[in-house]
Image (tube, rainbow, N blue to C red):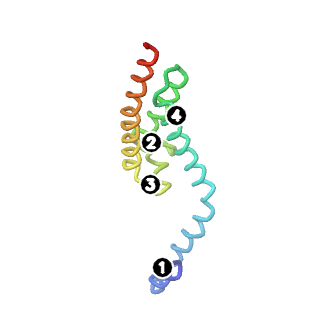
Amino acid sequence: MKEKILSLLLSDAAVQEQYLNTLRRSEFLEPEKALLLAVLQDAIASYQKYCSARDRVGKERFSEAEHWIMHKGDDWIFTFDNVCELLGLDPQYVREGIREWGARSRTQEKPRRRQGLRRQAA
């Protein structure tokens, strides 16, 4: 793949050098990208784990994760939007997927609660 791209850039030495510098730099950024991915995964895991929490701590954790994920903006390097973009992800697409998961989770949760209440009443 690198060879194909380089063959396209052979005519322009400056562009070729920029590409090679970016390629070299990306190898050094892998630990940082792994850290960003861990931050994103932790937020999504907390959102999913605590979405139906009943206790104060669980509700707070869900609220923090939800606020970070749903807040739009790039006023800080570690905003959801910036983390997604640095990882090459579309923040709005990821956000929509999380919202859809939450909606499905809530609709699946309601029948189980009703069944549990019926068993207790019996």
Q: Would you name the residue on which mark 1 appears?
A: 5
In the displayed structure, would residue 1 be above or below residue 114? below
**Amino acid type, residue under disc 3 in the picture:** Leu
For the point 36% across and 41% down, the residue is 100
Q: Earlier in the sequence, mark 3 or mark 4?
A: 4
Q: In terms of image quadrants, where is residue 106? A: top left
Disc nearest the viewer among 2 and 1: 1
Q: Nearer the viewer, residue 86 or 116?
A: 116
Judged by depth in the image, the label closer to the viewer, 3 or 1, is 3
Residue drawn at x 46%, y 83% is 12
Instruction: Measure how far apart labels 2 and 4 are at the Cα level.
Output: 27 Å
Label 1's element?
Answer: helix
Kindly report which numbered mark, 2 or 4, lies closer to the viewer in this rendering.
4
Residue 5 location (% of width, % of height): 48, 79
Identify the element where label 3 is drawn: loop
Q: Which residue is nearer to you in this view: 96 or 116?
A: 116
Around disc 4, counting alpha carbons within 10 Å, would you say few (fewer than 14), some (14 to 19), or many (20 or more)?
A: few
Q: Amino acid at mark 4?
A: Lys
* Residue annotated with mark 3: 89
Near mark 2 (Cα within 10 A), the count class, few <14, some 14-19 or many ≥20, is: few
Q: Which residue is mark 2?
A: 75
